[in-house]
Amino acid sequence: MAQSKEQRILEFVKENAAKGDPQSVVDHIDKYCNQKEWAMNVGDEKGLILDKVFTETNPTTVLELGTYCGYSAIRMAQLMKQGSRLLTVESKPEHAAVAKQLIEFAGVQDKVQILEGATETIIPSLKTKYEVDQVDFVFIDHFKNFYTSDTKLLEKCGLLKKGSVLLADNVVYPGAPDFLEYVRTSGHYDCTNYPSHVEYSDKLDAMEKAVFKGN
Ligand SMILES: O=c1[nH]cnc2c(O)cc(-c3ccc(F)cc3)c(Cl)c12
Ligand SMILES: [Mg+2]
Protein backbone atom coordinates (compact mmCIF):
# COMPACT_ATOMS: atom_id res chain seq x y z
CA MET A 1 0.00 0.00 0.00
CA ALA A 2 1.60 3.29 -1.06
CA GLN A 3 2.23 5.82 1.71
CA SER A 4 -0.28 8.69 1.89
CA LYS A 5 0.70 12.37 2.14
CA GLU A 6 -0.65 12.35 5.72
CA GLN A 7 1.59 9.38 6.56
CA ARG A 8 4.56 11.24 5.08
CA ILE A 9 3.78 14.21 7.31
CA LEU A 10 3.61 11.89 10.34
CA GLU A 11 6.94 10.29 9.43
CA PHE A 12 8.63 13.68 8.98
CA VAL A 13 7.39 14.84 12.40
CA LYS A 14 8.45 11.63 14.16
CA GLU A 15 11.93 11.86 12.62
CA ASN A 16 12.50 15.59 13.15
CA ALA A 17 10.29 17.09 15.89
CA ALA A 18 10.81 16.94 19.64
CA LYS A 19 8.58 14.28 21.22
CA GLY A 20 6.25 15.69 23.87
CA ASP A 21 6.64 19.23 22.54
CA PRO A 22 3.39 20.41 20.86
CA GLN A 23 4.93 23.56 19.36
CA SER A 24 7.74 21.52 17.82
CA VAL A 25 5.15 19.22 16.22
CA VAL A 26 3.17 22.20 14.89
CA ASP A 27 6.34 23.86 13.56
CA HIS A 28 7.49 20.69 11.79
CA ILE A 29 4.11 20.10 10.15
CA ASP A 30 4.29 23.69 8.85
CA LYS A 31 7.88 23.17 7.69
CA TYR A 32 6.95 20.02 5.76
CA CYS A 33 3.83 21.57 4.21
CA ASN A 34 5.65 24.77 3.26
CA GLN A 35 8.69 23.05 1.76
CA LYS A 36 7.57 19.61 0.57
CA GLU A 37 3.81 18.99 0.13
CA TRP A 38 0.86 21.35 0.64
CA ALA A 39 -1.76 20.04 3.06
CA MET A 40 -4.96 21.52 4.48
CA ASN A 41 -3.80 22.24 8.03
CA VAL A 42 -5.01 25.64 9.28
CA GLY A 43 -1.32 26.61 9.12
CA ASP A 44 0.88 29.21 10.80
CA GLU A 45 -0.78 32.45 9.62
CA LYS A 46 -4.41 31.49 10.40
CA GLY A 47 -3.08 29.48 13.35
CA LEU A 48 -2.11 32.75 15.05
CA ILE A 49 -5.71 33.98 14.63
CA LEU A 50 -6.95 30.68 16.10
CA ASP A 51 -4.55 31.07 19.04
CA LYS A 52 -5.70 34.65 19.71
CA VAL A 53 -9.46 33.94 19.58
CA PHE A 54 -8.97 30.70 21.54
CA THR A 55 -6.97 32.42 24.29
CA GLU A 56 -9.49 35.28 24.53
CA THR A 57 -12.27 32.67 25.00
CA ASN A 58 -10.26 30.56 27.49
CA PRO A 59 -12.66 27.63 26.99
CA THR A 60 -13.23 24.59 29.23
CA THR A 61 -15.09 22.46 26.68
CA VAL A 62 -13.86 22.64 23.08
CA LEU A 63 -15.33 20.99 19.98
CA GLU A 64 -13.52 20.75 16.65
CA LEU A 65 -15.29 19.72 13.45
CA GLY A 66 -12.61 18.35 11.13
CA THR A 67 -9.48 16.90 12.76
CA TYR A 68 -7.50 16.06 9.59
CA CYS A 69 -3.95 15.39 10.89
CA GLY A 70 -4.58 16.98 14.28
CA TYR A 71 -2.58 20.17 13.67
CA SER A 72 -5.22 22.56 15.09
CA ALA A 73 -6.14 20.12 17.88
CA ILE A 74 -2.47 20.12 18.98
CA ARG A 75 -2.32 23.93 18.60
CA MET A 76 -5.37 24.39 20.82
CA ALA A 77 -4.45 21.66 23.33
CA GLN A 78 -1.23 23.45 24.25
CA LEU A 79 -3.28 26.55 25.13
CA MET A 80 -5.91 24.69 27.19
CA LYS A 81 -6.14 25.18 30.97
CA GLN A 82 -6.05 22.28 33.47
CA GLY A 83 -9.27 20.26 33.49
CA SER A 84 -10.40 21.39 30.06
CA ARG A 85 -11.06 18.98 27.20
CA LEU A 86 -11.14 18.99 23.41
CA LEU A 87 -13.40 16.69 21.39
CA THR A 88 -12.46 16.57 17.72
CA VAL A 89 -14.60 14.92 15.02
CA GLU A 90 -13.08 13.28 11.96
CA SER A 91 -15.03 11.36 9.29
CA LYS A 92 -12.04 9.74 7.50
CA PRO A 93 -10.51 6.80 9.44
CA GLU A 94 -7.16 7.20 7.66
CA HIS A 95 -6.95 10.83 8.79
CA ALA A 96 -8.06 9.97 12.33
CA ALA A 97 -5.32 7.31 12.49
CA VAL A 98 -2.59 9.82 11.60
CA ALA A 99 -4.07 12.46 13.93
CA LYS A 100 -4.09 10.00 16.84
CA GLN A 101 -0.37 9.33 16.36
CA LEU A 102 0.56 13.02 16.01
CA ILE A 103 -1.52 13.96 19.08
CA GLU A 104 0.20 11.21 21.11
CA PHE A 105 3.66 12.20 19.81
CA ALA A 106 2.92 15.80 20.87
CA GLY A 107 1.94 14.53 24.34
CA VAL A 108 -1.52 16.14 24.42
CA GLN A 109 -3.57 12.92 24.28
CA ASP A 110 -4.92 13.48 27.81
CA LYS A 111 -6.71 16.64 26.68
CA VAL A 112 -7.84 15.51 23.23
CA GLN A 113 -10.43 12.90 22.30
CA ILE A 114 -10.87 11.99 18.61
CA LEU A 115 -14.44 11.01 17.67
CA GLU A 116 -14.56 9.11 14.38
CA GLY A 117 -17.70 9.59 12.33
CA ALA A 118 -19.93 12.10 10.61
CA THR A 119 -20.61 15.36 12.45
CA GLU A 120 -24.35 15.11 11.86
CA THR A 121 -24.33 11.78 13.69
CA ILE A 122 -21.90 12.69 16.47
CA ILE A 123 -23.20 16.15 17.41
CA PRO A 124 -26.61 14.79 18.59
CA SER A 125 -24.79 12.21 20.73
CA LEU A 126 -22.43 14.62 22.55
CA LYS A 127 -24.69 15.17 25.57
CA THR A 128 -25.66 11.54 26.12
CA LYS A 129 -22.61 9.57 24.91
CA TYR A 130 -19.77 12.02 25.69
CA GLU A 131 -21.21 13.76 28.77
CA VAL A 132 -20.96 17.20 27.21
CA ASP A 133 -23.22 19.84 28.76
CA GLN A 134 -22.43 22.81 26.53
CA VAL A 135 -19.44 23.85 24.40
CA ASP A 136 -17.52 27.09 24.96
CA PHE A 137 -15.55 27.04 21.69
CA VAL A 138 -16.15 25.34 18.33
CA PHE A 139 -13.50 25.33 15.58
CA ILE A 140 -15.30 24.58 12.30
CA ASP A 141 -12.84 23.28 9.71
CA HIS A 142 -14.37 20.28 7.96
CA PHE A 143 -16.41 20.67 4.75
CA LYS A 144 -17.97 23.97 3.68
CA ASN A 145 -21.23 22.23 2.74
CA PHE A 146 -21.80 21.21 6.39
CA TYR A 147 -20.90 24.49 8.14
CA THR A 148 -24.46 25.84 8.26
CA SER A 149 -26.31 22.58 8.92
CA ASP A 150 -23.88 21.66 11.72
CA THR A 151 -24.22 25.13 13.26
CA LYS A 152 -28.01 24.79 13.29
CA LEU A 153 -27.65 21.28 14.72
CA LEU A 154 -25.47 22.59 17.58
CA GLU A 155 -28.23 25.11 18.37
CA LYS A 156 -31.00 22.51 18.14
CA CYS A 157 -29.13 20.12 20.45
CA GLY A 158 -28.78 22.84 23.10
CA LEU A 159 -24.99 22.66 22.96
CA LEU A 160 -24.45 26.43 22.66
CA LYS A 161 -24.80 28.88 25.52
CA LYS A 162 -24.70 32.71 25.58
CA GLY A 163 -21.09 33.54 24.74
CA SER A 164 -20.20 30.27 23.01
CA VAL A 165 -17.69 31.07 20.27
CA LEU A 166 -17.74 29.54 16.78
CA LEU A 167 -14.59 30.09 14.72
CA ALA A 168 -14.83 28.93 11.10
CA ASP A 169 -11.89 28.42 8.76
CA ASN A 170 -12.03 28.93 4.94
CA VAL A 171 -15.00 31.28 4.77
CA VAL A 172 -13.44 32.90 1.67
CA TYR A 173 -11.57 29.96 0.11
CA PRO A 174 -12.94 27.37 -0.55
CA GLY A 175 -15.69 29.61 0.86
CA ALA A 176 -18.81 29.13 2.98
CA PRO A 177 -21.19 31.86 1.76
CA ASP A 178 -24.35 30.31 3.20
CA PHE A 179 -22.66 30.01 6.60
CA LEU A 180 -21.62 33.69 6.53
CA GLU A 181 -25.15 34.67 5.46
CA TYR A 182 -26.66 32.60 8.28
CA VAL A 183 -24.50 33.74 11.20
CA ARG A 184 -24.51 37.38 10.04
CA THR A 185 -28.29 37.66 9.51
CA SER A 186 -29.91 35.15 11.88
CA GLY A 187 -29.82 37.56 14.82
CA HIS A 188 -28.31 34.86 17.06
CA TYR A 189 -24.63 35.78 16.61
CA ASP A 190 -22.19 38.69 16.89
CA CYS A 191 -19.75 38.19 14.01
CA THR A 192 -16.16 39.27 13.33
CA ASN A 193 -14.22 38.56 10.12
CA TYR A 194 -10.45 37.95 10.18
CA PRO A 195 -8.93 38.32 6.69
CA SER A 196 -5.96 36.04 6.03
CA HIS A 197 -4.63 33.65 3.40
CA VAL A 198 -5.03 29.97 2.53
CA GLU A 199 -2.43 27.99 4.48
CA TYR A 200 1.01 27.88 2.84
CA SER A 201 -0.29 30.06 -0.02
CA ASP A 202 -0.96 33.66 -1.05
CA LYS A 203 -4.59 32.96 -2.00
CA LEU A 204 -6.94 35.17 0.01
CA ASP A 205 -8.96 33.48 2.74
CA ALA A 206 -10.55 34.49 6.05
CA MET A 207 -11.82 33.14 9.34
CA GLU A 208 -15.17 34.16 10.85
CA LYS A 209 -15.88 34.38 14.56
CA ALA A 210 -19.55 34.06 15.54
CA VAL A 211 -20.42 34.54 19.22
CA PHE A 212 -23.76 33.01 20.20
CA LYS A 213 -26.11 35.55 21.86
CA GLY A 214 -28.27 32.96 23.55
CA ASN A 215 -31.66 31.62 22.53
O1 LIG B 1 -11.77 20.76 2.75
C1 LIG B 1 -11.20 21.49 3.57
N1 LIG B 1 -11.50 21.34 4.88
C2 LIG B 1 -10.90 22.09 5.83
N2 LIG B 1 -10.00 23.03 5.57
C3 LIG B 1 -9.62 23.22 4.26
C4 LIG B 1 -8.63 24.19 4.00
O2 LIG B 1 -8.11 24.87 5.06
C5 LIG B 1 -8.21 24.44 2.70
C6 LIG B 1 -8.76 23.74 1.61
C7 LIG B 1 -8.23 24.08 0.27
C8 LIG B 1 -7.94 25.40 -0.04
C9 LIG B 1 -7.39 25.73 -1.27
C10 LIG B 1 -7.12 24.75 -2.19
F1 LIG B 1 -6.58 25.06 -3.38
C11 LIG B 1 -7.40 23.41 -1.90
C12 LIG B 1 -7.96 23.08 -0.66
C13 LIG B 1 -9.76 22.77 1.87
CL1 LIG B 1 -10.48 21.91 0.56
C14 LIG B 1 -10.19 22.49 3.20
MG1 LIG C 1 -9.31 24.71 6.79
Image (tube, rainbow, N blue to C red):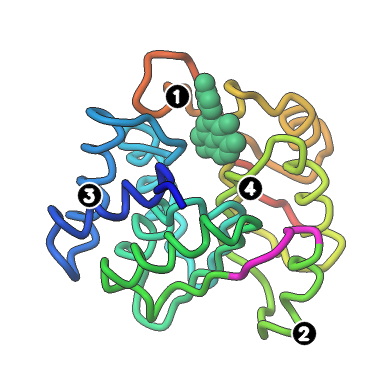
Q: Magenta segment, which residues?
A: 115-120
* Of marks 1 and 4, the one in the foreground: 1
SS type, badge 4: strand
Residue 211 tag number: 4
Q: Are marks 3 and 2 in contact (CB under 8 Å)?
A: no
Question: Which residue in the protein does label 1 denote?
Answer: 198
| Chain-order first, disc 1 or disc 3 | 3
**Residue 135: quadrant of the picture:** bottom right
Q: Residues under labels 3 and 2: Cα distance?
A: 38 Å
Q: Residue at x 27, y 29 (%)?
A: 34
Query: How many residues crowd mark 3 within 10 Å: few (<14), some (14–19), many (20+)?
Result: some
Amino acid under disc 3 = Phe
* Of marks 4 and 3, the one in the foreground: 3
Q: Quadrant location of the C terminus?
A: bottom right
Q: Is residue 79 left or right of residue 2?
A: left
Q: Residues under labels 2 and 1: Cα distance?
A: 36 Å
Q: Residue at x 52, y 62 (%)?
A: 96
SS type, badge 1: loop
Q: Residue at x 67, y 85 (%)?
A: 131
Report x, y in % for residue 70: 43, 56
Q: Is mark 1 within 8 Å of ligand 1?
A: yes
| Chain-order first, disc 3 or disc 2 | 3
Question: Which residue in the protein does label 2 denote?
Answer: 128
> Residue 117 lies in magenta, yes or no?
yes
**In the foreground, 161 or 143:** 143
Question: Which residue in the protein does label 3 denote?
Answer: 12
Q: Residues under labels 1 and 3: Cα distance?
A: 22 Å
